[in-house]
Structure formats: C-alpha cells, structure tokens
Amino acid sequence: MSRYQLTVVAIMAIFTYLPRFIPLTFYRKKITSPYLLSVLYYLPYAVLGALTFPGILNATPHMWESLFGGLACLFCAYREKGLVFVAIMGIVVSYITYLVLTII
Amino acid sequence: MFTNGLRRGMPIALGYFPVAFSFGVLCVNSHMPLGMATLISVTNFTSSGQFAGLNLMIAQASYFEVALTLLMINARYFLMSLSLSQKIDEHMNTLERMIVSFCISDETFALASLEVQPVTFRWMSGFLLGPFLGWSLGALAGELVVGLLPAAIQGAMGIALYGMFIAIIIPASKHALPVAFVVLMASLSHIFLTYIPLFHFMSAGFKLIFATLIASLVGAKIFPREVSDDE
C-alpha cells in the first residue's frame, strides 16, 4: 500500500467519524420541543424510505432482477415476515429472475 | 441486555455481509492491494462513503477533495448522532459515547431509534458487534474469495440490505398512517432528486439528507406526536 493510499484511508476515516462523534459525545441536554421530538421520531423512517427508493433498482446487476426481488420483499414485508426472511426471499427471487432472464 | 442487543443487530449483520463482500470484490477488481478493502471497512464502517472514497483513490484525487466529499456524504450522521444523543442512557460516559458513535450508520441508527427503552452501553455493544463484524468480515471474504462465488449469486445478494429496510418500513407504515406518509414522502422526494437533471449538482449524500429532512419536517408538522413518558 502506498503512502498516498494510506493517507486517503486516514482522511476518509476522520471525516466519517467526526459527524458521528461530535453530537453524541458533546450534546448532553434533553430536547423538549414537541415539534423537534416529532421530527426525530419520524427521522429513521424517512432515512430508510429514502435509502430504499430509488436505490433498490440498482441493488443487483440487472434492473429486472432488482425489481422482482424488491417486489418479493414488499410482499413478504406486508405479510409481516421477519427481517431475515424478507432479505433471504429477496435474494432467492432475484437469483431466480436472473436464471429466467438468461434462459429467455 | 448484551444478548438482547446482539439479537437485534443480527439482521443488520446479515444484510451488511453481502454489501461489504461486494466492496471487497470491487477493491480487488480495481487493482487495490490485498487487505485494502478490509482496512477501509474496519476504519470507516460506512457504505456510501467507502465506495465514494475508493473511486476517489482510484482517480488519484487530492486530499482536499477526499475530505470534502466524505464530509458531504456523511453529514447525515451528524443528524443521526444528535437524534441518538436523546435516545441513549444519559449515564453513558465519554469513552462509551466515543465507541458507540463510531458505529452509527443508517441502519444501526434506524433500529436503535426504534427501541422502546433508552439504550444502554451494554445493549449497544451487543447490538453493534454483529453489524461491525458482518461489515469487516464481509469485506475480508470478498477480497479473499473473489471468483469462488458465482457472479450471479454475488449479484443477487445485493438485494439483501434493501430487503431489510423494506421489512422495517412496510409493517410500520401498515400500522401507522403518519409513518406511511413520511416513508412515502421521503421515497418520492429522493426519487425526484435522483432523476431530475436539475439536481445533478447535489452529491448523493446531500440528496439523502434533503429528502430525509423534508419528509420528517413536514410529517412532524402535519402529524405532531403527543409527548408521553414512554417515548
């Protein structure tokens, strides 16, 4: 590994850690504003929604594979299967889609 | 507490493994020295930032560019860290806070926030151990066994992480209309920001922050939550 590469890794690590570290370590007060508390309550759902769409379409090498895998996940999640089950069904259906696509 | 946390973190660990694996494969295919993917994963523990950083490294970008890009992509962690500061047990000391904050990611943040109780350091250590190992070992495995696993299976595994997200947001949306509203709004905003060429100037991390903030700010305005003791 070259000196340049190692320096880049160090810079990456520092600028990933700083925004994680500063608020949690130094902000010790309790937020009392009901509006702000509501925002913080909705935040994780918003993050997950934005992370999933449209990113899921590029989750696998082929769009159709991602689409059908994603639909399988949506179906299983709606039926309230567990996290791991939903993830594994996604992989299985994506793989089957890939196989079907190569046959056609 | 520790084992309860460990159990909660397992799905994330399973979801991280294939993503980190593909990062390991990508590093080797980009002619990075062996061990680089694992080194980056252990010291950074983040997905989008690592993929972006690797691309910059391949392009021989300047240190300043690396710092700025990573800061933009990771700015969302600032918000999550602030939110978690309200969630964690207030007796957590500085060293414990420093350790816990290292492992804040989109997924660990989301799941830890959804815990009903304030989270203690013991619970957090168990909870974060799985995802950290899944991420590091995934990258290591990716570097070492490139080629052993058929490419088609590697590809299909990419859906796992998204499957996890869906398994959280869909049932929650089913049970609470405000949550469904926030999820839908965040998704649509992010889709618009991604596909409308007008917004191409924004970095990926910034688009994510923007979509997330809009959805939670508007959601909180329309559906304010009653403050109660169990929150």
Image: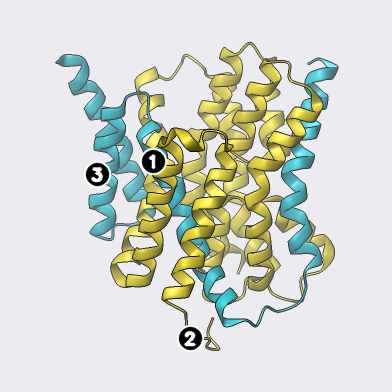
Chain colours: A cyan, B yellow
Which residue is nearer to you in this view: A46 or B14? A46
Q: Amino acid at mark 3?
A: Ala
- C-alpha separation, residue under disc 3 versus residue under disc 1: 16 Å
Q: Amino acid at mark 2?
A: Glu
Task: Name the residue located 35 percent from the left edge and 21 percent from the top edge.
Answer: B152
On what subunit does the disc labeled 3 rest? A
Q: Is residue A60 left or right of residue B174?
A: right
For the question of whether residue B7 can be seen, the reply is no
Q: Secondary structure at mark 3?
A: helix
Which residue is nearer to you in this view: B61 or A58? B61
Residue B149 marker: none
- C-alpha separation, residue under disc 3 versus residue under disc 2: 35 Å
On what subunit does the disc labeled 1 rest? A
Q: Residues within 10 Å of mark 3 (few under 14, many from 20)?
A: many
Residue A82, position as x, y percentages in the image: 34, 57
Labels 3, 1: front one: 1
Residue B158, position as x, y percentages in the image: 41, 33
Question: Mark 3 vs mark 1: which is more N-terminal?
Answer: 1
Q: Is residue B65 left or right of residue B13?
A: right
The residue that label 3 is drawn on is A72
For the question of whether residue B73 can be seen, the reply is yes
The residue that label 2 is drawn on is B226
Question: Is disc 3 in contact with disc 1, using a CB cutoff of under 8 Å?
Answer: no
Residue A54 marker: 1
